[in-house]
Image (tube, grey):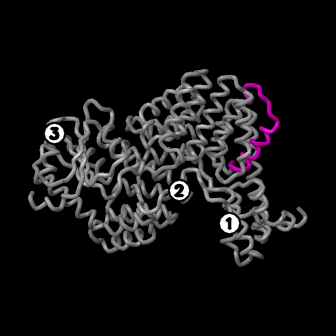
Amino acid sequence: MAALDSDFSTCSALVVDGNPTSRSILVSQLRDFGVASVAQAARAVDARRQLEFRTFDFVLCEQHFPTDAMSGQDLLDDLRRNQLLPFSTVFIMITGEATYAKVAEAAESALDGYMLKPHKATQLGERLVAARVRKVSLQGIFTAIEEEDFEEAARLCLDRFEARGQFWLYAARVGAELLLRLGRCIEAQTLYKAVVDAKTLPWAKLGVARSQLEAGQINQATSTLEKLIGEDANYADAYDVMGRAQFELGRFDKALETYKMAATLTPASISRVQNLAMMTYYSGDHEEAEKLLDKTTRLGLDSKMFDAQTLVLLAFTRLGTADRKGLQRCYDDFLRLIDKDEGNARLRRLAAIVEALNLIQQHQFARSVDAVREMAKTVREPQFDFESASNLVALMAQLSAKAIQLNELEETIDVIGRRFCSNRSLTELLAASAVSHPPYADRLRLAQSQVLEFAETAMALSLAGDPTNAVKNLILHGRDTLNSRLIDNAYQLLQKHSAKVKGAPELQDMVQQLKARCGPLVNRASLGEQKRQAGGLALLTGKRVAPEIGKLPDPPPASLPPAEELLPGV
């Protein structure tokens, strides 16, 4: 293996194996190959912590850990799902098992290699070299991704796929992921289907379902997923996507069953236990949710995979059971998270909710009311997102349930409802947040019917041959409600009937201004902070610093004309 010395002289590696003898052999072999730096971990959970904060060129990981609930496959799945493993890292699974199911599962995870114990040093060296050849071959694609030139990266992938060049199958998978990111869902769907036709692979079938879901074809996606799960009942990623589809359709009971299955298949996955915990909470079983939320916090509080919304929901359950000490621990945990990431605006918003719950628990109602009033002032700001809305609704419901009547709270509920109740799933998720005060849930559902009426009125105008007033109507109500569905409908009508709409450029400017006021478009329900979709690959970038979570650019100066100029007679 002397020929490999120069190749690996600048490389680093991580060996993950619970057996000290096996771990020592792998470390020695890597050092014989000339790997400059070799770190070790005896458990998958310890390896995960290292991989969250450090990048390695090679990761050699044992599949089975007798004393650890997390397997090597669980580790890889979580790293991929949460964008913690860059394309440049070579990940090789080393195991004593060689069953078809295990090999297939490893292949679906985009592994770089799968080695059976015992192996010779030359075999390991050949695998490492082969994996590096693929990384070098695809370097142009990886470089474009790191520079955030996604159009160029997608083009390179498509060229390689069409020419059936070296590693064309992997390039197709990366290319489809890029197309999804670029919003070219139909093209991604076509590419996934082409892979299925060329070589039937479960990840490609799952990609078809993901593309359908992104394109809004939820029923088609559900049908695709049902077939896929029927073919492989242990494909955990398929359950993740199915749960998301059911959740977006507002079928919370079905989504709960699906997330239970995903968590059962991979009990050590923080993301899946977290999804199950949140879904259980929003389904109304707060007693069971408290156990799952607490488990998630204990399992992953120090992990980058942990979503701080878990702590917020845990705080609500502990207020419900009058667990004063537990509620205080939630707030203390938030302070520790903020200590590690002081500039994170989202963490501070979430911590403010828990602080207000603490005040309610301590019967400091005057201070908690002041806190709620301050939050209510932000409901029309771009930074006020759906997550902020659901948390504030839940907080206001807690105050009202304790017979603390504030006249302005009902008005705030109406404003939130008209802004965010764009469809049934969003409405029911907000209504679930108001479970402790049912009248608020009723007002939110009424708000959705009002939004639907606005959209139907505009559609009727368009069908009657008056797209100009249809767009103006949507802009008028969009400005009043800041509802992203109405504003997006106005945008779609302008795109479709631009030649027939009088003053289309001016109206287009108004729509763009409203989009800036709304912040990110919210037309789908989600559990916690959005992460990479299950079944895909992480598209890590390296050039631009990611924007602060929860921080949006300031909207352009307001310059929309008065309502009577949009629609005379209003």
Of labels 1 and 3, earlier in sequence is 3
**Residue 193 visible in the displayed image:** no
The residue at which mark 2 appears reads as 547
Number of residues whose C-alpha sits closer than 10 Å to that of mark 3, classed few (under 14), some (14–19) or many (20 or more):
some
- Whether tag 2 and tag 1 are in contact, CB under 8 A, the answer is no
Secondary structure beneath label 3 = helix
Give percent across and percent down for residue 432.
Answer: 64, 36
Task: State the image quarter where residue 250 is shown.
Answer: top right
Q: CA distance from mark 2 to mark 1?
A: 21 Å
Magenta region, residue range:
400-421
* Residue 221 versus residue 562 in the image, above or below: above
Of labels 2 and 3, earlier in sequence is 3
Which residue is at the front of the view, 47 or 490?
A: 47
Closer to the camera: disc 2 or disc 3? 2
Q: CA distance from mark 2 to mark 3?
A: 43 Å
- Whether tag 2 and tag 3 are in contact, CB under 8 A, the answer is no
Number of residues whose C-alpha sits closer than 10 Å to that of mark 2, classed few (under 14), some (14–19) or many (20 or more):
few
Q: Residue at x 64, y 41 (%)?
A: 390
The residue at which mark 3 appears reads as 22
Image position of 302 (left or right of 102):
right
Q: Amino acid at mark 2?
A: Pro
Secondary structure beneath label 2 = loop
The residue at which mark 1 appears reads as 512
Secondary structure beneath label 1 = helix
